Amino acid sequence: MGWAILSVCIFALIVLGVPVILRAVLGVKRDDANSWRERMELRYQNIGISVWIFAWFKLRLDAMFRELPEFVKVMPNLRTAMDLGCGHGFAACALLEWFGELKLYGVEPSAGRVCTAARATGERGVVVQGAAPDFEWPGLPDRLDAVFALDMMHFLSDADFERTLRRIRARLNDGGYLVIRTPMAPESFGSWAWHLARIVRKIQGIGAWHRSAQRIQDAMTAAGFQTTKTQMSGENPELYWFIAMACRNETGGSR
Ligand SMILES: C[S@@+](CC[C@H](N)C(=O)[O-])C[C@H]1O[C@@H](n2cnc3c(N)ncnc32)[C@H](O)[C@@H]1O
């Protein structure tokens, strides 16, 4: 009996103590949050320990947060943007930190992630549950300055991918930007990480469509975009950025 009580106490100490220790060691103090990274961490620090730790690592390890700031320099006046498949809202929050006037619309199928992203983005975010290609809802502005679709387009079949591109084009202002980062079809056998992700998806029963760079660029052109940049992400040949501009006089055609 004594051992059982001691075990419960030790377990409770670990469960309650680890988050306190982690916050003391890794946490950002509100008054010290000067950089965009620190302000972004603050947004997650009090939401939940797992999502905060995820954000902490993602900010440091994912090349997205080194590369995306460079890409968005060509879009200095972002006022309205959508993050399609926003997940926990990490990129959405970074965008809000970089663009002080931005209103961010997030769409995400997972209810739990919608909740986290809504809390993290706060008053300047509107996050709804939904999924491409049927991502539109009445509260979405008719016209957006930019759309970000990060690490999610491979979840769409070819038909849904093309429909999503056309619908995004129809929502963008002429000259507006579409920023995609997506896992690619591997050149040869594929890395262990690519195969691990494939096995995890198989266990979860999630389908994936990995395309070549040419296939993605062709689909973007057909939807009314001009590709302005195609670039590897984090020196990983299985992960690429595609930045495209909405061509003028293009209404998106049939949706
Ligand atoms: C790898 S996560 C990336 C999340 C986020 N974009 C980021 O970069 O941190 C992929 C996200 O896409 C979402 N997703 C899957 N299918 C989708 C669809 N049809 N439309 C929109 N989002 C989708 C998943 O729920 C998941 O949150």
Image: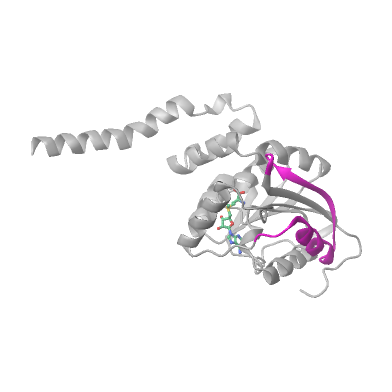
Nearest the eye: 43 or 49: 49
Quadrant containing the C terminus is bottom right
138 in relation to 125, above or below = below
Q: Is residue 212 magenta?
A: yes
- Farthest right residue? 249
- Farthest front residue? 189
Quadrant containing the N terminus is top left
Residue 104 in percent (x, y) is at 67, 51
- Along the horizontal axis of the image, is 76 left or right of 29? right
Residue 198 in percent (x, y) is at 54, 56
* Visible residue check, residue 28: yes
Rendered-image quarter of ligand 1 = bottom right
- Write the residue at 83% across / 72% down: 253
Nearest the eye: 126 or 203: 203
Q: Quadrant of residue 222?
A: bottom right
- Farthest bottom residue? 254
Q: Which residues are magenta?
A: 210-236
Q: Is residue 225 magenta?
A: yes
* Visible residue check, residue 48: no
Nearest the eye: 234 or 92: 234
- Write the residue at 23% across / 33% down: 10
Residue 120 in percent (x, y) is at 56, 45
- Along the horizontal axis of the image, is 132 left or right of 207? right
Q: Quadrant of residue 76?
A: top right
Residue 118 in percent (x, y) is at 56, 51
- Write the residue at 52% across / 40% down: 44
117 in relation to 62, above or below = below
Render colour scheme = one colour
